[in-house]
Image (cartoon, helix red, strand yellow):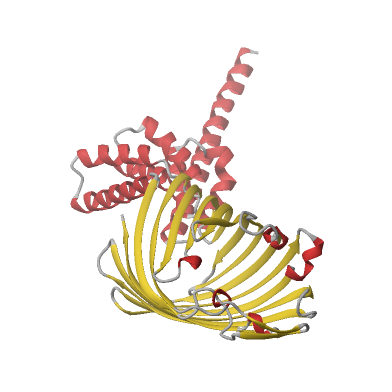
Amino acid sequence: MNRFYYIVFILSLQLLHFGQAQAAESEAELVTQMNVLIEMGRYQEAYSLAQTGLFDYEGEPAFDFAYGLAALESGRPNEAVFAFERIAFNNIGQQRVRLELARAYFLSENYAAAETLFTEVLASNPTENVRTNIQAFLQLINQAQSASDSVVIWNLGINAGTDSNINSATELGVIDTPIGDVTLSPGGQEIDDSFTDYSAGFNYIRPIDNNRNISFQANYNHRNNHVTDQFDLTVGSGQLSYNWGLNSNLRYSHVLRLQMVKLDATKFQSSATFLNSIQRIGNNGWSQSLTGAYTLVRYATGQNANANLRDINQILVSGVLTKSNNRNQLSMSVFYGDDSIQRKIAKNNETNIMGLAIADQFLLRPRHLVYGRVSFQNNDHQAPDPIFNRSRKNETFSTSVGWIWQLNSNLTLTTDFTFTDNESNIDLYSYDRNRLQTGLRIQF
C-alpha cells in the first residue's frame, strides 16, 4: 500500500511540473505575440490579446510590462499605472519600468507622482537621450501645472471717434401721422457728435480640473459725447460662467449675466440673461456652436412713468459655423429671437427677430489682423403702433471693417468703421448711421 501512495505522489509531482512548464510556455508565447503587435504599433490588438491572459498571468513581470505598454499606448493610462506599479514594487532598480510608470502617471494627469519619478531617474545619470526625454516631460508637467492655476486678466481701453447719429434717430424734421404732420424736436432727430469711450474690465478663471473651470467677468464702459450729454451711455456688466467638456472637441458653457445701462448718468435699463451654449471642434479647421439665451429686460421709470411698457422677456437662439486656418477665420451665424411683452397694453413693443451675419478675419502679417462683418436683421412688431395704426417692420443692414495691431504682448491699437442702415415702414424709425473710432487697449 505504501508503495502505491509513493507512486501516486511521484506522478502528481510530475503532472504539476508538466502543468507549470505548459503555463510558462503559454505565458511566454502570449507575451511574445503582444510584443510583436506593440512593435508594429498595433496597440489596441495587443491590449485585446492581453485581456485573454489577464486572469492567469496578471502579476508576472513580463506579462505586466507588455500589458502596461499596450494599455498606455491604446489610451488607458490608469490601467498602465497598475501594471507598471506591480513590477516596480518588486523591481525598484529597473529604469525602463520606472520611466514607463512615470509616463503613465503623466498621461493619467498625476503630475506630482510623474515629476517625482522622472526626477529620481534623472538623478541616476541616465544616457543623454533618456535625459533629453525626461527634461521634455518635466517641461510639459510644469506647463500643465501652470495651466491649472487661477488666472486674472485686467484690461483698460480708450477710444476716440465720430458718430453721425448718436441717438439712432431719423433725419426728418416733420413726420406724417394719421392725425397730421408732427414736427420733431432737435432731440428726436439724428445728432452728429464726436466722442471719447472709456472701458475697464477683468476676467478671473479658476480651473477645477482639465475639463472644467469657472470664471467671473466684469466690464465697465462709458461713452462721453463731446457736445450732447443727453445720450452719454454707461454700461456695467458682470457674468459668472461654468465651462466644461466631455473632451477637447466638445465644450459646454452655462452663463449668468447681469447688466445695467445708464443714459446721461440716469438709470435707463437693466437685464439678466441665462445662457447655455455648446461648441464642437471638428476636423480641418471646422467648428460649430449653438447658443440659447433667455433674457429679462426691464426699463427704469424714473424720468418716464410709462417706460416699463417696454419690459420684455426674450428668447434668442443662434448657431455659428466657422472655418479656420493658420491665417484666416470665416464664420456664418443665423439667429432667431422672440420677445414676450410684460404688459399687454404695449403689445406693439413685442417683436420677432430673424437675422444672418457673415464675418471674416485675416492675419495680414504678424501682429496685424484685419476683419470685416456684414449682417442683416428683420424685426416684426406683433401689434399696430398706437400712433401710426400699423405694425412696424424694420430691416437693418450693418457692415463693419477694422484693423487690430498688436503693438506688444500687452498693448493693442484698434481702428473700426461701422455703417448701419435701418429701413422701417414707419418713417420715424428709419435712419442711417456711420461711426469711426480708433483707440488703445492694454491688457495685463
At 33% from the left and 40% from the top, the residue drawn is 98
* Residue 421 at least partly seen: no
Q: Find the residue positioned furthest to the top.
A: 2
Q: Quadrant of the C terminus?
A: bottom left
Up/down of 257 relative to 163, above or below: above
Give how far across and how far down residue 229 sits, in percent: 45, 66
Q: Is residue 362 left or right of residue 320?
A: left
Up/down of 375 relative to 279, above or below: below
At 59% from the left and 86% from the top, the residue drawn is 172
Labels in figure, total:
0
At 52% from the left and 38% from the top, the residue drawn is 58
Q: Quadrant of the N terminus?
A: top right
* Residue 140 at least partly seen: yes
Give how far across and how far down residue 441 sits, in percent: 33, 64
Q: Nearer the viewer, residue 364 or 74?
A: 364
User: Quadrant location of residue 162?
Assistant: bottom left
Q: Is residue 326 left or right of residue 7?
A: left
Up/down of 196 relative to 87, above or below: below
Q: Is residue 422 left or right of residue 346?
A: left
Give how far across and how far down residue 354 sits, in percent: 68, 76
User: Quadrant location of residue 62?
Assistant: top left
Q: Nearer the viewer, residue 179 or 423?
A: 179
